[in-house]
Image: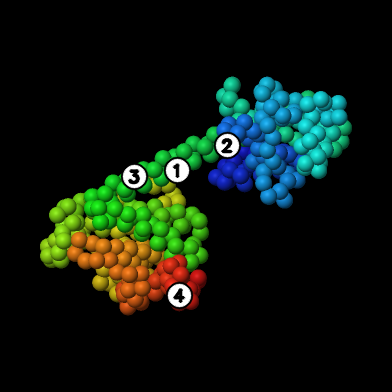
Amino acid sequence: MQVSRAIGSTRDTRALMKTIIEHVTAVFDADRSSLYLHDVAKGELWTEVAQGLEHWPNRLRIPADHGLCGRVFATHQPVCVFDTHEEADFARSVASRTEYSPRSMLIVPILLGPTQCVGVLQVMDHRIGHFHREDLPLLEAIAVQVAISLENAELYHAQRRQFKSFVESFSTALDARDPLTAVHSINVANYAMGIGTVLGLSTQELEWLRIAGLLHDVGKIGVREAVLTKPGRLTTEEFEEMKEHAVLSRSILSKIEFIDDLKGLDVVAAAHHERLDGSGYPDSLRGEEIPLKARILAVADVYDALTQTRHYRQGMSMHEALRLLDAMAPHQVDRQCVGALRAFLGCGAWPIDHD
């Protein structure tokens, strides 16, 4: 029951496995427990979590056919060891490396289906005969839950990889409409993450900014190529058409069912052309009405646009673009975000208010 509650409370696989083996150690009144997973490429078992080795800089690795764990991994059969000193397969070299030599052990396979073994779960104690074969069913039941958790984690990461590849492919396809902006979305994503890093945003928020940066101009798919690639100044009508890409970005992204971590991405993507004084578009938002992430994207977007060559002008130098951004702050763009961009680029910065 404790393991089931732990599974339902976290998506961090390593933290979950640490919690599980702590419960396992407690319920079996043992010294320590460890979880080995199979590295297919290297033919090894490695410690995803191992109590007593928390101070190790690297994870413990052993050949997949080595020791009692290797036997259980190969045969898919659990073992209850009364005294390790009487076991020829006991990995004495591992005991020496870890400076811990158990006398009794329980080891069970972690199975995905009837044939695929992905690792082993072991419990160890210094007392001879501390475990009994009657203990194995409980440990096997916990191993089933570990297997389900690992499988769910892999499915989740596979979905994330699939989504990441979709975003990157979509962004590349959009930028490819105009050779002069072929890396614009990637640049905006990188600058936005740099600004966010200086401002102290979390890893999750930085990933959010990366995806928002890659997709912020998705609405340009609805802008005529003649307008996107026009070599001269846009007419009033053409500029109004160009401005519509922000609304279209919001419309397109609002139809994507983002996971909770990415909620609101459509709103921020549409707001990266808003200005603090209300002169931006599409909604003429002012000041704090503009989300922080949109203010970050705005600075990243302006900087990249200024430093890249366009059909109607040559790109500015880094210092020229930063001076122009300085002039735009604080009335049009966020002063703290400009300062963070300066710091990220190594050009000095104003003091950053992390509050």
Secondary structure beneath dot 1 equals helix
Q: Which mark is residue 349?
A: 4
| Viewer-proximal residue among 258 and 342 | 342
Residue hosting label 1:
160
C-alpha gap between disc 2 and disc 1:
16 Å
| Viewer-proximal residue among 212 and 1 | 212
C-alpha gap between disc 2 and disc 3:
30 Å
- Judge depth for marks 1 and 3 and give the one in front: 3
Residue at 68% across / 32% down in the picture?
63
Mark 2 surroundings within 10 Å by alpha-carbon count, few (fewer than 14), some (14 through 19), many (20 or more): some
Residue hosting label 3:
169
Mark 3 surroundings within 10 Å by alpha-carbon count, few (fewer than 14), some (14 through 19), many (20 or more): few
- Residue 175, above or below 321: above
Q: Amino acid at mark 3?
A: Ser
Left or right, 215 with respect to 144, comes to left
C-alpha gap between disc 4 and disc 3:
34 Å
C-alpha gap between disc 1 and disc 3:
14 Å
Q: Amino acid at mark 1?
A: Arg
